[in-house]
Image: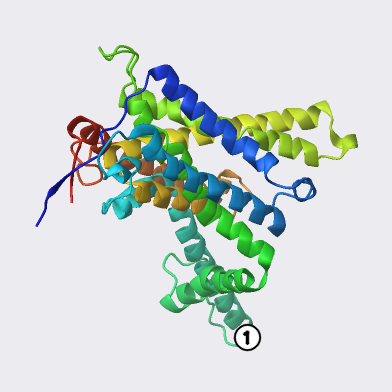
Amino acid sequence: MTTAAALCKHRSVSLHQAILYCFSLAVIFVVSLYTFVPCNVRQLRRDHETHIKWRSSVVVALASMGIAIYPWLFCDDGNIWYRYIGINASRNSPKAVLHAAMLYLGSLTFHWLHFYHYARILQMEEMRSRNSTLKSSVTVSTKLLLLPKPQYMIISVNRLWIKPSKESLQSFLKDETYRWTILRNLLIAPISEEVIFRACMIVPLLSSSENDNDTLKLSPTQICWIAPLFFGVAHLHHFYEQYRQLPAVQRTKQAISQLIVGLLFQLTYTILFGAYASHLFIRTGSLLAVIFVHIFCNYMGLPEVSFASPTSGLHCYRWLLWCAYFMGIALFIKGFNSSWVFPDESVLPSLLLRGVAII
């Protein structure tokens, strides 16, 4: 049986106040990493386990504080305030991950072709070995076969995926640095960043307006592109970190130019991902869905395009892989209009409009 429960009456703030609030959160996020992490720890490399532990503690504390003060800042009455920051029983998480996975269709195809091509090579090498031991006049073909036998595919998957996965698991259990690097990239960073830069920012921006007539009120589309700017600002300190770690003799103009190019690339990537994550959060109202997508994208990394190089073993499949990438992009774009992936009505604007949650 479903019943309606009153959400908290979300407090509207001016557009300038909302932007100042979001900017302050981003600044506090960065400043805290330098204020609350001891100086001797900051001198360690970024991937040192002690450095990761300190930074993780700081961002987890900030995320927890952001959730704790949210109802105090933005709720006048009511007790179902947590729906505004995406804490609900939504089942959109698997669908959201599948939608994001469309962008990686080329990368997923690349990995499958890696198994397939290696299996073909294994079978060809065994045929060559047999051919060299044959003393008869029978000639055995040593060309790559189009369809390798199943046993060679099994060997390929075992060597290229299962065995490395087992080694990675062993390293996770035994190597503290590796363990904390994985936890940071696939758990701590996605959760804390989505809480701070999506859950705590999106609804205040959605509910803001310049006056009672809703002048200068931001549309959901505008918020999807504005909110990631704060996310991007919070990553600017990576430039300083990389510059600080360069020995003085290596701080040349060329090195600095390379750092700037890297910074611009990272800024572009974080803004694009932030725009998608903001759209996903507004449409589904699910913090869990955004976190899972963030984890998946961190795990997959940047799209794999090494096959474009003539020296790549998979260069012969380049047209198939390019087609897979373009097909994935097309499916990803089409997915925005799919009622299977996204609700027909955006959840967060609906919550702000009606102020009622179905529980």
Screen quadrant of the N terminus: bottom left
Residue shown at the point (56%, 47%) measured from the top left: 59
Residue shown at the point (45%, 23%) measured from the top left: 19
Query: At which x and y percent is residue 356?
Result: 18, 40
Whether residue 275 is visible, yes or no, is yes
Whether residue 307 is visible, yes or no, is no
Residue linked to disc 1: 133
Q: Is 232 placed above or below 185 here?
A: above
| SS at badge 1 | helix
Residue shown at the point (54%, 50%) measured from the top left: 60
Farthest left residue?
1
Front residue of 71 and 51: 71
Query: At which x and y percent is residue 292?
Result: 40, 52
Q: Is 239 placed above or below 311 here?
A: above
Q: Is residue 283 left or right of residue 248?
A: left
Query: At which x and y percent is residue 170?
Result: 61, 74
Q: Is residue 288 left or right of residue 321?
A: left
When asked about the image quadrant of residue 29, the answer is top right
Q: Is residue 221 left or right of residue 225?
A: left
Residue type beneath disc 1: Thr
Front residue of 340 and 241: 241
Front residue of 98 and 287: 287
Farthest right residue?
249
Query: At which x and y percent is residue 79?
Result: 27, 44
